[in-house]
Image: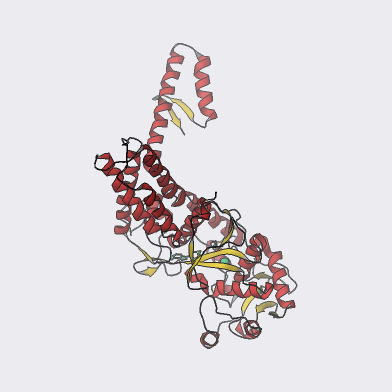
Amino acid sequence: MSLYKNQPLKIYNTLTSEKNTFVPLHQGHVGMYVCGPTVYSNVHLGNVRTFMSFDVIYRYLIHLGYNVRYVRNITDAGHLTDDGDIENDRFVKQSRLEKLEPMEIVQKYTVDFHKVLEKFNFLPPNIEPTATGHIIEQIELTQKLIDDGFAYESHGSVYFDVMEYNKRGFNYGELSNRNIEELFANTRDLDGQNEKKNPQDFALWKNASPAHIMRWPSPWGYGFPGWHLECTAMSTKYLGEKFDIHGGGMDLKFPHHECEVAQGKACNGTSPVNYWMHTNMLTMNGQRMSKSTGNYILPMELIEGENNFFEKAFSPNIVRFCFLQAHYRSVLDISNEAMVASEKGYNRLMEAISLIKDLKPSSDSSFDVNAWQQSCYDAMNDDFNTPILIAQLFEITRIINLVNDGKETLTTDDINIVSKTINDFAFNILGLKNEMSSGNNAEKLSGVVQMLIEMRNEARANKNWALSDEIRDRLAALEIHLKDGKEGTTFTL
Ligand code: AMP
Ligand code: ZN
């Protein structure tokens, strides 16, 4: 039986402003869409925090036995710094700065993003669509919105008509709890707004002159799609007109996700998403981490120790452990102290884990392992509460140490439950890796290769060329290459 049947999960839903019991549209299946990075520069640690929160959510849904389709896009076109002047296209701006083609910018930072995700042990999504790969779908949606009277063309651009949407009984502002009158009163006058009927109207398609390299033909002339429409087009294509979970950072709630709700409702008459999830921000020096203000650290700068903020380098595992010690809906202020404390905590947990295999079982247990295991589930079932889960992992760390000292007892079965539960929650769900055991494995491997080198030397001394060649070739087949030099034989893994 699938675990989800007896582990009811609650998710905080931005749409209802409360925790709701999670019931997927199709039993046993979950469709989840998370807004991916805008690949015009390196992802910073703040971005990593948001994607990590969804990585853990994805991992937990899989653990519960759901068949999850996780779609996380790459925004590689159309993300303007505002909804006005196309000169503010992030890709075009950056390509001028770096003297590269916009698509070279896209490639460079997509590769960087993937490298970071791998370092931090992220599970890849099932589909990673790009905005530029879905221009046709976006044109089709735009056309449908025009045909249905929700959008209008103006000077080769197409805008969503917010006033018309509300006139038809919908409520622009429902997700971000904004009042439409206030919105109308507070909108800044930006370039390009004279093309719009109302300042709240947002671009579905932007007209672009030949000077603008990233442009595509459309029924309204050459141009490029609006950022909000990208996510609607890609989520609809891969998850359907209505799906279970849509996520992103809090800063995307408005206008990005508000516009997605409006686009989905206008196109299909139904709310596109059942559970909207928003992660809180990573701050540094008390301020939101952000590229534009310069208040940021790149993930590689942190793990390689090349920065002026942290006193030393911290491994990706420690960063993961630190980030997950805060709930995803709380602000997390990154600091050297927090990272040092996380390193200590992580080491304490891993040391306890290394003791498990040598614990002496007793005929009965003085600690209720099943209740402890359920409290790990309770933590995650309560809106993915990773700090409480980690507190439970510290609790079992304490028990393991006491059993090791003979002050508490566990049966063989209970030791096995502890071992399995830690494996599930610390490694499979929180996505931590055991640096201690991988360190040992690396040591063991180089010991074994060293032994084979010595056996090969002996074979050569005995002129047993067949054996010495076989050792070299079979190691090479495993991509372990031996190199004979003056100082002896060395190897590369
Ligand atoms: P972007 O590439 O700017 O579209 O951002 C990618 C994701 O990172 C979005 O979900 C943002 O909400 C999120 N994000 C941006 N800055 C931060 C931050 N300081 N802390 C947490 N998440 C962030
Ligand atoms: Zn999006």
Count of labels shown? 0
Q: Identify the image's colour scheme: rainbow, by chain, secondary structure or one colour.
A: secondary structure
Q: Is residue 86 visible?
A: no
> Which sits in the foreground, 394 or 438?
394
Return the residue found at the far front.
364
Classify residue 475 as left or right of residue 261.
left
Residue 79, position as x, y percentages in the image: 57, 69
User: Residue at coordinates 35% horizontally, 51% vertically from top-left?
Assistant: 393
User: Residue at coordinates 46% horizontally, 15% vertically from top-left?
Assistant: 460
Give the vertical position of 104 relative to 490 (above or below).
Answer: below
Residue 199, position as x, y percentages in the image: 58, 84
Residue 63, position as x, y percentages in the image: 50, 51
Q: Is residue 288 visible?
A: yes
Give the vertical position of 209 relative to 456 (above or below).
Answer: below
Q: Quadrant of residue 128?
A: bottom right
User: Residue at coordinates 66% horizontally, 69% vertically from top-left?
Assistant: 224
Return the residue found at the far top.
462
> Which sits in the foreground, 185 or 82?
185
Give the vertical position of 277 relative to 157 (above or below).
Answer: above
Residue 187, position as x, y percentages in the image: 53, 84
Classify residue 210 as left or right of residue 113.
right
Q: Quadrant of residue 136?
A: bottom right
